């Protein structure tokens, strides 16, 4: 009887250990994408920064532009909501908003724009080559078409948000920020 009970308890313990992990809100890209790497100018203080300046924090990387009529402000507002849901842990997170439209997004314009959303957001600006290299690194598509007599000034970009852990490893990507609670839960898992 004791032996049967011991076997039953062992089976229950092993089953409990093999329970699947809670799913992520974002898509797991661990080991698929490269580490965070860039050199750009931070609009908040005009300092040249690299990925090393953000080690030790959870980093969310998003490409957009300040004149975006809908996707960018909605995404940044949702990420701001996510930061609020983190409470004091929000200080351990940085959202990097990389402009794909440096011709119009000067440092002062970018600084004012990100400040309207959350203090944990840093606007980043680089030259065309630096932006293109960073976008290529994470397979982000964007285009800027200057105005012409036949065509208005047009900017397009993908809506992916990348999550990097405290060591700069790419961990998650999401195309939807509609669930700030889900996003916050993912960040909390990195912080635990």
Image (tube, grey):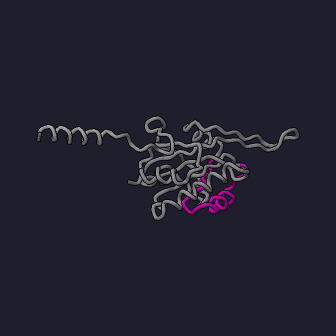
Q: Residue at x 64, y 46 (%)?
A: 127
Magenta range is 103-126
Out of 49 and 155, give the one closest to the viewer. Answer: 155
The outermost residue toward the front is: 1
Q: Residue at x 51, y 60 (%)?
A: 85
Q: Residue at x 60, y 50 (%)?
A: 178
Residue 95: % across, % down: 55, 54
Query: How many numbered marks have been drawn onto this rendered protein structure?
Result: 0
72 on left or right of 15: right
The outermost residue toward the bottom is: 88
Is 42 a magenta residue? no
87 on left or right of 4: right
Residue 49: % across, % down: 53, 53
Is 116 a magenta residue? yes
Where on the picture, by quarter, is residue 42? bottom right
Out of 87 and 153, give the one closest to the viewer. Answer: 87
188 on left or right of 157: left
Residue 157: % across, % down: 67, 41
Q: Residue at x 53, y 59 (%)?
A: 83
Q: Quadrant of the C terminus?
A: bottom left
């Amino acid at each position: 009887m004791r032996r049967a009970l011991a076997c039953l308890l062992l089976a229950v313990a092993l089953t409990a250990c093999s329970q699947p992990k809670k799913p992520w809100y974002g898509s797991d890209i661990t080991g698929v994408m490269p580490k965070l790497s860039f050199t750009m100018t931070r609009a908040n203080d005009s300092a040249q920064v690299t990925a090393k300046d953000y080690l030790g924090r959870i980093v969310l990387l998003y490409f957009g532009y300040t004149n975006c009529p809908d996707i960018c402000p909605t995404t940044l507002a949702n990420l701001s909501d996510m930061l609020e849901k983190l409470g004091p842990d929000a200080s351990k997170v940085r959202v990097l908003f990389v402009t794909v439209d440096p011709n119009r997004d000067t440092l002062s314009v970018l600084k004012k724009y990100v400040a309207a959303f959350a203090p944990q957001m840093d606007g980043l600006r680089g030259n065309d080559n630096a932006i293109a290299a960073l976008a290529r690194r994470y397979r982000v598509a964007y285009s800027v078409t200057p105005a012409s007599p036949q065509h208005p000034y047009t900017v397009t970009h993908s809506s992916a948000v990348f999550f990097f852990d405290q060591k700069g490893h790419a961990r998650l990507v999401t195309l939807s920020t509609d669930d700030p609670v889900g996003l916050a839960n993912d960040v909390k898992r990195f912080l635990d």
